[in-house]
Amino acid sequence: MPLQNKENDTIYKGRAMYAKVSVNSETGEINIIGEPIAVDETATKVKRNGFEITYLAYLFDVFDQLGGQKYKVFKYIVEHKSNDNTLIITIRELAEACNVSIETVRQCLKLLKEKGLIHTRTGAIMILPKIAMRGGDKKEAYLMRKFEAFEEETVIPDDVIVKGST
């Protein structure tokens, strides 16, 4: 059987000691209970192929600030984005789709932009790939580059991207 050229996704992190301890609440004294255990620590990279990535911890703070009606707008954007993390929609269409006011949509988009979670241009919204995207590491890297340039680029019909407006 031929040898396969596979990368080793497991990294040796070193040796560590673990012990069960008790703390005396009055004196603060720490006592080891039983024998310490010596272990070799490793980390294994897990591929994400095809899974939707959502960084919930990053979003919890934003959810608190969004509240009910603005949250409906954010949820709609995430659920209706394309594979390249964009949603082609006007503010008026987004307000109608979410059954909220245009002002609510504007406030939501403003907050999401301030937090760095979206970029916008006329009629389009792009979501930060670290928040939600489907695909692996290479697609995430591609979408991050696209996200960074999203507001500054103009796409012309032959799919050539030109900096600035023409």
Image: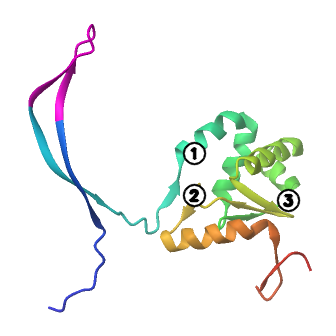
Residue positioned most to the top: 26
Residue located at (13% from left, 45% from top): 38
Q: Position of residue 54 (x, y in %)?
A: 53, 53
Q: Residue at x 66, y 40 (%)?
A: 62
Give the residue pinned by disc 3: 90
Q: Are marks 1 and 2 in contact (CB under 8 Å)?
A: yes
Which numbered dot is residue 130? 2
The kind of residue on which mark 3 rests is Thr
Q: Earlier in the sequence, mark 2 or mark 3?
A: 3
Residue type at mark 2 is Lys
The amino acid on which the numbered mark 1 sits, given as a three-letter code, is: Tyr
Which circle's residue, 1 or 3, is located before the other in the chain? 1
Q: CA distance from mark 1 to mark 2?
A: 9 Å
To which quarter of the image does residue 65 belong?
top right
Compared to 6, does 15 lie above or below?
Answer: above
Q: Which residues are magenta?
A: 19-34
